[in-house]
Amino acid sequence: MRALGAILSVVGGIAAVAATLITLSFAPVDVNATAAELDAAIALVWMSVICAVMCMIFGMLALGSNAVLAGFFVIFFAVAGSFAGGIFVGAASTMAALGGVLAVIGGFLHERGTLADAASRKPTNKVPQPRLQLIHTPAGATVTLRPRRLLPQSAV
């Protein structure tokens, strides 16, 4: 789950960067806006670009050992970028936030040992014990099967 969360975070960050660049290209369309309003809008869009890049960076860090903290940062930057960039950026940042949630869940499961890698699992050498036991009788070459610990040894 950590790997899936990291991949979703990086892909969501790339989509958010593309969405912010599209938003940035359409920002000066409003003709009634003053220069100060346009500067504020452009600054917010650049802030969402920075948040999207941080989503990609922390998404890559989610593959490492501390995926929980990186996942929380991905969620934080995805929400901050979606508030700063608007609806189009928010739709793209949703994928990064979902990746952050999966990275947090995968990190918690990995820390508990529930979700261990197949290479790190130790092989068990325990062989299951049979329910029946072979007994050679002194009467000859006959072999009898009986359940284990069902009869005391003196009864045989």
Image: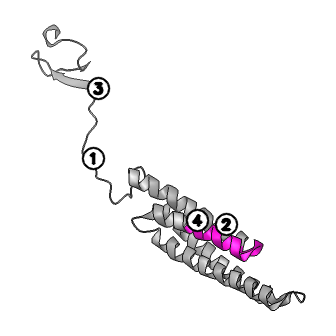
Does 100 appear above or below 132? below
* Any part of residue 92 in sight: no
Q: Give amino acid for label 4.
A: Ile
| Sooner in the amino-acid sequence: mark 1 or mark 2 | 2
Whether residues under marks 1 and 2 lie with C-beta atoms below 8 angstroms apart, the answer is: no
Mark 1 element type: loop
What residue do we see at 66% from left, 77% from top?
15
Alpha-carbon span between mark 3 and mark 4 = 54 Å
What residue do we see at 29% from left, 26% from top?
131
Q: Give amino acid for label 2.
A: Thr
Alpha-carbon span between mark 1 and mark 2 = 42 Å
Tell me the magenta residue range.
74-89
Q: Give amino acid for label 1.
A: Thr
Q: Quickly name the residue at label 2.
A: 94
Q: Quickly name the residue at label 1.
A: 124
| Sooner in the amino-acid sequence: mark 3 or mark 4 | 4
100 within the magenta span: no
Residue neighbourhood size for the residue with mark 1, other residues' Cα within 10 Å, grouped as few (<14), some (14–19), many (≥20): few
